[in-house]
Image (spheres, rainbow, N blue to C red):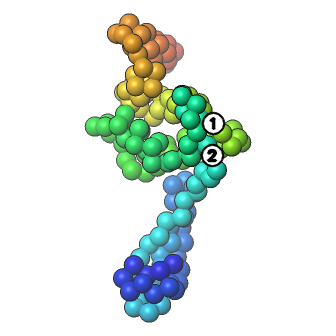
Amino acid sequence: MRCPVCLAPDSKVNDSRLVEDGFAIRRRRECQRCNYRFSTYENTEILNLAVIKRDGRKEAYQREKLESGLKKSLEKRPYTLDQFKKLINQIERDLQKKQRDEITSQEIGEVIMKRLKNFDKVAFIRFASVYRSFDDVQTFQRELQQLLGKRSAKTKLKK
């Protein structure tokens, strides 16, 4: 790994630690030439996954698009960066479990909604309203009632 300060081609690893529930590795490095210390992160990537869009076009899977959509739905909601990274990893792991080279954007949306429903109910409703393209207030209300109905049933069981 190149040093970010002097651009020397060699650095040595002083320490490695698992982070993000074991889905990433943080490495502490030191430049052999200038002794500058820095950290690097190693993450898993979904490689060679093609996303089939609603109009039939195919494009390569892009983690940035997933993160962007989730950030919009989680805007002004309480969560930590670690929780967010864990959510991303869970969603990507669910996609990898399908063991296919191609996946539809609808399938990705369903996986995201499944994970968001347990992560943050408000973010789930926000995401669902865009993803499912609610045409009217009644459709939106039905989705909300389903969410609240399951929630009130759980509350009754706890009593």
Badge 2 is on which residue? 49
Could you tell me if residue 12 is visible in this image?
Answer: yes
Check the image and report above or below for 65 versus 139. Answer: below
The image position of residue 41, as x and y in percent, is 49, 65
Check the image and report above or below for 61 versus 33. Answer: above
Q: Residue furthest bottom?
A: 33
**Label 1 packing within 10 angstroms: few (<14), some (14-19), many (20+):** some
Label 2 sits on a secondary structure element that is loop
Left or right relative to 138: residue 62: right
Q: Residue furthest left?
A: 76
Left or right relative to 84: residue 10: right
Q: How many marks?
A: 2
Left or right relative to 3: residue 53: right
Please tell me in which quadrant of the rendered image residue 143 appears: top left
Give how far apart the Cα atoms at labels 1 and 2 are.
7 Å
Find out whether the residues at labels 1 and 2 contact each other: C-beta distance under 8 Å: yes
Badge 1 is on which residue? 103
Q: Which residue is at the front of the view, 148 or 142?
A: 142
Q: Amino acid at mark 2?
A: Leu
Q: Which residue is at the front of the view, 8 or 22?
A: 8
The image position of residue 115, as x and y in percent, is 52, 33
Q: Amino acid at mark 1?
A: Ile
Could you tell me if residue 152 is visible in this image?
Answer: no
